[in-house]
Image (cartoon, rainbow, N blue to C red):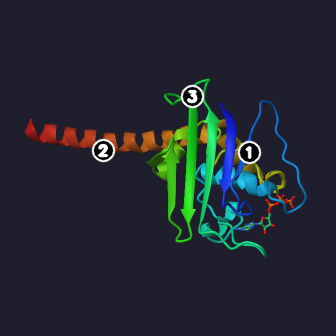
Amino acid sequence: MKIKSLTLNGFKSFANKTIINFQDGLTGIVGPNGSGKSNITEALRWVLGEQSVKNLRGSKMPDIIFAGSDTRAALNRAEVTLVLDNEDGYLYNQPNEIRITRRIFRSGDSEFFINEKKVRLKDVVDLFIDTGLGRESFSIISQGRVESIFNSKPQDRRILIEEVAGVLKYKKEKKKAESELVETTEHLKRVADILSELS
Ligand code: ATP
């Protein structure tokens, strides 16, 4: 699976429709301070379903819509489209090309589309679960994150490593299975009680 392109339209400093085509190999985005490099990674995060405004350096979701400049009025909506090349079938049961679009209006209403079909946030999140590209994955590491990882307590770092290694998911499943086991044991005891009452 590869990123083919990212299109920003009205997202933060990208008032005009801007298409970034990714070629094979490594892509570096360079530019002066404040030119919008971080905004590009945030657009990627956002289209993948980011719900935390803090992670997008805003205080409310509509803050990501172009707020206007000396020469241009503010816009009323922002849209980001991510096109993925899935020719290797990395995303199981999905077409060779996948287009994910997210749109937001000043009212705060947000819409998601997968291959032009309107979907829920959950559908986008589910599409990327366990692929390493989801909104909570570590494929996007923001400024300051590396430092905070090094400065964190060993216990917190362990949680992080478990998350990266995919252990947390199994821990959660284990906890769920254990509570189901307790519940089933209670049911069995109840059945045994009824049986002894009947015999
Ligand atoms: P640095 O190299 O300093 O990290 P950068 O290239 O990563 O900078 P960004 O942080 O991506 O730059 O972009 C910051 C710019 O985006 C600022 O000029 C800011 O005013 C602008 N910006 C952020 N949100 C909006 C918005 N909603 N509307 C218009 N411009 C915005």
| Label placed on residue 186 | 2
Residue in view at x 60 percent, y 56 percent: 79
Mark positioned earlier in the residue sequence (2 or 3): 3
Q: CA distance from mark 3 to mark 1?
A: 19 Å
Which mark is nearer the camera, 3 or 1? 1
Ligand 1 within 8 Å, label 1 CB: no
Q: CA distance from mark 2 to mark 3?
A: 49 Å
Quarter occupied by residue 85? top right
* Mark 3 residue crowding within 10 angstroms, few (<14) / some (14–19) / many (20+): some
Q: Position of residue 43 (x, y in %)?
A: 68, 54
Which mark is nearer the camera, 2 or 1? 1
Q: Is residue 54 left or right of residue 33?
A: left
Ligand 1 within 8 Å, label 3 CB: no
Question: Which residue reaches farthest right?
Answer: 32
**Type of the residue with mark 2:** Glu
Front in this rendered view, residue 23 or 196: 23
Ligand 1 shows up in the quarter that is: bottom right
Front in this rendered view, residue 145 or 177: 145
Question: Which residue reaches farthest bottom?
Answer: 70
* Mark 2 residue crowding within 10 angstroms, few (<14) / some (14–19) / many (20+): few
Would residue 35 be visible to someone looking at this image? yes
Mark 2 touches mark 3? (CB < 8 Å):
no
Residue in view at x 46 percent, y 51 percent: 120
Q: CA distance from mark 2 to mark 1?
A: 58 Å
Q: Position of residue 75 (x, y in %)?
A: 63, 69
* Secondary structure type for disc 2: helix
| Label placed on residue 96 | 3
Q: Is residue 113 left or right of residue 10?
A: left
Question: Which residue reaches farthest top?
Answer: 88
* Secondary structure type for disc 1: strand
Q: Mark 1 highlights which residue?
A: 20
* Secondary structure type for disc 3: loop
